[in-house]
Image (cartoon, rainbow, N blue to C red):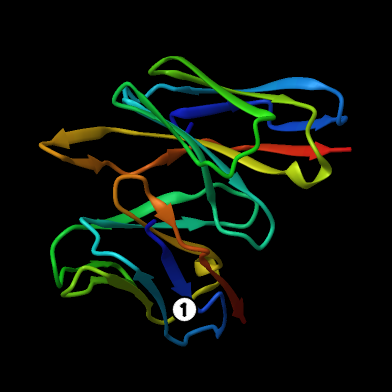
């Protein structure tokens, strides 16, 4: 039990489908993240919800849409994906504290990921 | 934006030998974190360094934070097959991850 649970573990979807990835954290953290991990590429930060703000990587296509209804739950809504979107999608959480203008991050706790295949 | 670079990308090590992987940032970091991802698994936190010049050890693993807080290293002594995986460094609040060093071990 990692404290961060992701469902589903595996997902195969066509390019016209709409699906959602779910993440839940049981650690009492105040920040949640979506990362994309493709083969032979760095972990790519997609979205962050932290300290009541959402931060996004401007290079993430609009066919990925995050939703964070509360500090424990995070979703990634997918629609009209492309085959190159096939990857491991990792959710993570952490505790972020703010001191003046600086913010500090506790270690990230990752879920097991969703292996997504777009056909 | 902040960029974190890791070298080497791949490290093939004979069992029992030592090796070092390096992490370099384009900007000064307030802290740096190291993670390990086993094949088929997810990244797991190893350690966090905060102070300039800080050195921390975990059994055969030695982590160091540079004096200028722009680089870090992970040194593994007497490599074992259990060390196989990808080691990532991540810096600062938004946790920009390096590309990782993937380690394979020859028995």
Quadrant for residue A119, please give it: top right
Q: Where is residue B13 shown, x and y percent of the image? A: 55, 84
How many numbered discs, if any? 1
In this rendering, does residue B62 appear at all?
no
Q: Residue furthest top?
A: A69
Quadrant for the C terminus of chain B in the image: bottom right
Q: Where is residue B39 shown, x and y percent of the image? A: 63, 57
Quadrant for the N terminus of chain B in the image: bottom left
- Residue sitting at x 48%, y 31%: A1
Residue sitting nearer the eye, B48 or B3: B3
Residue sitting nearer the eye, A68 or B56: A68
In this rendering, does residue A44 appear at all?
yes
Q: In this figure, which residue is indicated by the disc labeled 1?
A: B79
- Residue sitting at x 41%, y 18%: A72
| A92 lies left or right of A119 | left
Q: Where is residue A112 shown, x and y percent of the image? A: 57, 38
| A34 lies left or right of A79 | left
- Residue sitting at x 80%, y 28%: A80
Query: Which chain is home to disc 1?
Result: B
Q: Is residue B81 above or below residue A83?
A: below
- Residue sitting at x 30%, y 68%: B59
Q: Residues within 10 Å of mark 1 (few under 14, many from 20)?
A: many
Query: What secondary structure is found at the residue carrying circle 1?
Result: loop
Q: Where is residue B5 shown, x and y percent of the image? A: 44, 69
Q: Residue furthest left?
A: A100
């Amino acid at each position: 039990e990692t404290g961060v649970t992701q469902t589903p573990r595996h997902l195969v979807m066509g390019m016209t489908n709409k699906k959602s990835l779910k993440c839940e954290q049981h650690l009492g953290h105040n920040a949640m993240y979506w990362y994309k991990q493709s083969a032979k590429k760095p972990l790519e930060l997609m979205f962050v919800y932290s300290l009541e703000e959402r931060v996004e990587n401007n290079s993430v296509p609009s066919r990925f849409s995050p939703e964070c209804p509360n500090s424990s739950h995070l979703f990634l809504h997918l629609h009209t994906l492309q085959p190159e979107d096939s990857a491991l999608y990792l959710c993570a959480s952490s505790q972020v504290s703010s001191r003046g203008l600086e913010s500090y991050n506790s270690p990230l706790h990752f879920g097991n990921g969703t292996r997504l295949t777009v056909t | 934006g902040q960029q974190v670079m890791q070298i080497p990308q791949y490290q093939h090590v004979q069992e029992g030998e030592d090796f070092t992987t390096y992490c370099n940032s384009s900007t000064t970091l307030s802290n740096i974190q190291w993670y390990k991802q086993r094949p088929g698994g997810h990244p797991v936190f190893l350690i966090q360094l905060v102070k300039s010049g800080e050195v921390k050890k975990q059994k055969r693993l030695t982590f160091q934070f540079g004096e200028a807080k722009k680089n870090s290293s992970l040194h593994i002594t007497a490599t074992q097959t259990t060390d196989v995986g990808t080691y990532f460094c991540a810096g600062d609040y938004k946790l920009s991850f390096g590309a990782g060093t993937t380690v394979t071990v020859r028995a």
